[in-house]
Image: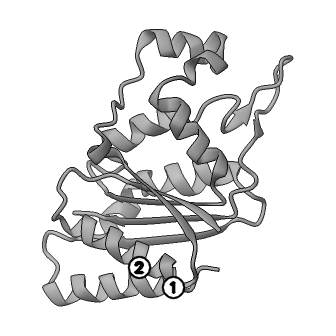
Amino acid sequence: MNVLVVYCHPHPESYCHALLERVLAGLAVNGHDVDLLDLYAEGFDPVLREGEWLDYIHNPARSISGVMAEHVLRIERAEGLVFVFPTWFFGLPAMLKGWLDRAWLPGVAFDIPPNGGVARSRLRRIRFLATVTTTGLPWLALQVLGFPGQRTITRGIRVGLAARCRHLWLALHAIDTTTRERRERFLVTVERRFAMVR
């Protein structure tokens, strides 16, 4: 399976990077073709500027240029999509949210019918979706808040993928106060779960 792994963390020696390494090791077990998109390492600009927004509204094809054209090709090749990021302020890091704003375009992720109506997905070939994240809050606190970051992916992005898209959500909660042993166990769990992906 062609798997696009979208990684978002600024520090190459972070725990989040250790999680990325375990994701890649797990995917290697069954020989998946992995395309790693490291947003910070690339210096990705997450800002959707006025001209690009106007193109998005009036001429979506024109907004697919420069680095975004390359990112669109990577999305179009993907049969699996994996996000690895820390949960910050209850949701996706700004860099990742900006990537979605700029990459999840009409003509790429969906089509808008000319006479109105419900948008139609163009990403039905993606049959596997996974997220690996950490949170500073405990699980119960995020439940009270309604899991905003998780909803963005599992309800927003997921709805536009294959009808029977498999989904995996792995989150280590309360990372700031958890034990080293628990962090180590989570690393092992992540690699094991991705080694099971076929």
Q: Amino acid at mark 2?
A: Ala
Residue on which the image places disc 1: 29
Q: 70 left or right of 90?
A: right
Q: 105 left or right of 142?
A: right
Q: CA distance from mark 1 to mark 2?
A: 7 Å
80 or 97: which is nearer to us? 80
Q: Residue at x 21, y 69 (%)?
A: 15
Quadrant in which residue 127 is drawn: bottom right
| Count of residue discs | 2
Quadrant in which residue 104 is drawn: top right
170 or 89: which is nearer to us? 170
Secondary structure at badge 2 equals helix
Q: Position of residue 145 (x, y in %)?
A: 37, 54
Residue on which the image places disc 2: 25
Q: Residue at x 14, y 84 (%)?
A: 179
Q: Amino acid at mark 1?
A: Val
Q: Residues within 10 Å of mark 2 (few under 14, many from 20)?
A: some
Q: Quadrant of the C terminus?
A: bottom right
Q: Position of residue 35 (x, y in %)?
A: 50, 58
Q: Residue at x 67, y 35 (%)?
A: 108
Classify 86 as above or below 108: below
Classify 26 as above or below 42: below
* Render colour scheme: one colour
Secondary structure at badge 1 equals helix
Q: Are marks 1 and 2 in contact (CB under 8 Å)?
A: yes
Q: Residue at x 66, y 60 (%)?
A: 79
Q: Residues within 10 Å of mark 1 (few under 14, many from 20)?
A: some
Disc ID at residue 52: none
Quadrant in which residue 96 is drawn: top left
